[in-house]
Amino acid sequence: MLRSLVEERDLSGRLSDNVARNIDQDMLMVRGIPSLLAHIEQIQNGLARVSTPSLTHLSPQAARNRLLNDPDLERLNQLLYSAQVYFGVAHVWLDTPDGYCVASSDYYERQTVIGTRHLDRDYLRAALLGRPGQQYGVGRISGTPGIFLSSPVYRNGDIVGAIIVKLGLVQMEHWVNTGKSFIVDPNGVIILANDPSFVGKAMPDAKVLSMTVWQRADLYQRTTFATLPLAPYRASLPAEVKKLLPDDDHASLVTFGPDGPPNLLKITSALDGGLSVYTVTPTPDLETFQTERRRYTFLLSALLVSLCALATLLVLYLSRGRRHLAATLALNATLEHEAKYDALTGSLTRRHFLKRLRQEMADTGHRAALILVDLDNFKQINDTWGHAAGDAVLAAFVRLCCNTLRGEDICGRIGGEEFGIILDNSDEAVALAAAERLREAVCQLSVPTAEGLIQFTISAGVAELVAGDDDKHWLHRADAALYRAKSLGRNRCVRYADIA
């Protein structure tokens, strides 16, 4: 029992430290995005030339319409949209020194953030003072929570505004995908949890409970918070257990509810942006601790007296075997991932894509369609911008596929710049519409590289699965449609039914 308690305590500590380490690593990379974008000359010049004093007497809708009709700001909107897709974040926008949002990656949405003011937000005030900003909150327009990161934008030594990047909860879910763990913001509100019922609740004595109703509504778009029923474990503990559980705020026994069983709680505080990681792991039955301890002590003593030498050898053997097994499992997992996924783009490899294609054909009774996509004039991109830039274009295209297509659609890299997409429960008309959406999204995309922004187009061929097909015939029909799209001048989509 004592050993089990030690293992649970160590497990709780490792889980908390791993979550904290993942957050620090992710935030270290994400925090550099607004700083990087702030050095783009187009953004600096755009913020410097825009004039917002004339907007103060307008309604938010009138201010939004005036900004959306500015052709220079339209190009800025397209650049911010490309940056959002490229970096895989939830939102990117620009604010002026008086707090107006003048350009945003959501410019095409009906409820865009353009024309609203954010001067009361801590992240913007920090950027306008010349330092990076960071704050958790809920968007006033989108109503979705996230972490807002900001950076000042300079031109000729003067601050001309700020660029803000929003990291949505979708991009942070992997932080709490193991163990019973949750993340708390500086105001004591649970923003992410392995148990969805925890999200949005407040910790006991949380700062948010003492905030005004206006402050809660402004920051969280809500005014009431249920309290997580977390309380210290009140039962008396054996001395051996107390030695393992130091009486402080970072490692203790707690219960959920007055009559709940004891759990080990580990808190890792003072993370990036004031976030705290809580990990909770169940403990053994403490009421039977003394009985179990005497029984295990007797068995252990008898074993040590009679088999001391053998036990030592056995421990060494098992320890070596566990290390070997762990290394083998890790190697196998790495090899399996490399066999399934393309190292550059993250899409399926050709071999695994064709395997999934055959599985679709074997699953009779439903419709499916295949799209073959080729990046137009890709050799010219490599020759002009270099192979590193070409690799960035391929990776950006796959990220755009993930954002544009359905979650169940399957994307794989078939050749150098040729990709295949399998659409389940779809006919040629549905697949052609999906291919057109993808083509139009590519036309709006600009890939930032060390050499500058790169734009490109794609051609696509669409073919529906028909009875009696094998993989070669299905691929041949889609390839014939792709060939027709390229022969017609590229940057277009063609379905096989139109050329058969």
Image (cartoon, rainbow, N blue to C red):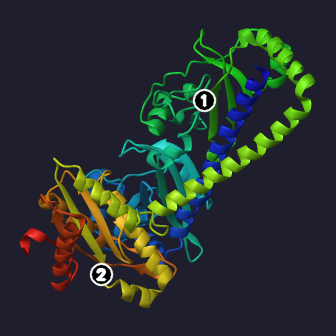
| Circle 1: residue type | Lys
Circle on res. 80: none
The crowd level at tag 2 (other Cα within 10 Å; few <14, some 14-19, many 20+) is some
Which secondary structure, mark 1?
helix
Most foreground residue, 201 or 174: 174
The C terminus: image quadrant: bottom left
- Residue 407 in view here: yes
Residue located 27% across and 59% down the image: 422
Most foreground residue, 412 or 138: 412
Which secondary structure, mark 2?
loop
The N terminus: image quadrant: top right
Residue located 55% across and 51% down the image: 123
Circle on res. 207: 1
Determine whether 418 is above or below 180 in the image.
Answer: below
Q: What is the x, y in percent for residue 478? A: 19, 71
Q: Earlier in the sequence, mark 2 or mark 1?
A: 1
| Circle 2: residue type | Asp
Determine whether 133 is above or below 380 in the image.
Answer: above
Determine whether 103 is above or below 167 in the image.
Answer: below
Determine whether 487 is above or below 166 in the image.
Answer: below
Residue located 16% across and 47% down the image: 365
User: Is 429 placed left or right of 204 in the picture?
Assistant: left
Circle on res. 376: 2
Q: What is the x, y in percent for residue 387? A: 48, 83
The crowd level at tag 1 (other Cα within 10 Å; few <14, some 14-19, many 20+) is some
Q: What is the x, y in percent for residue 431? A: 18, 61
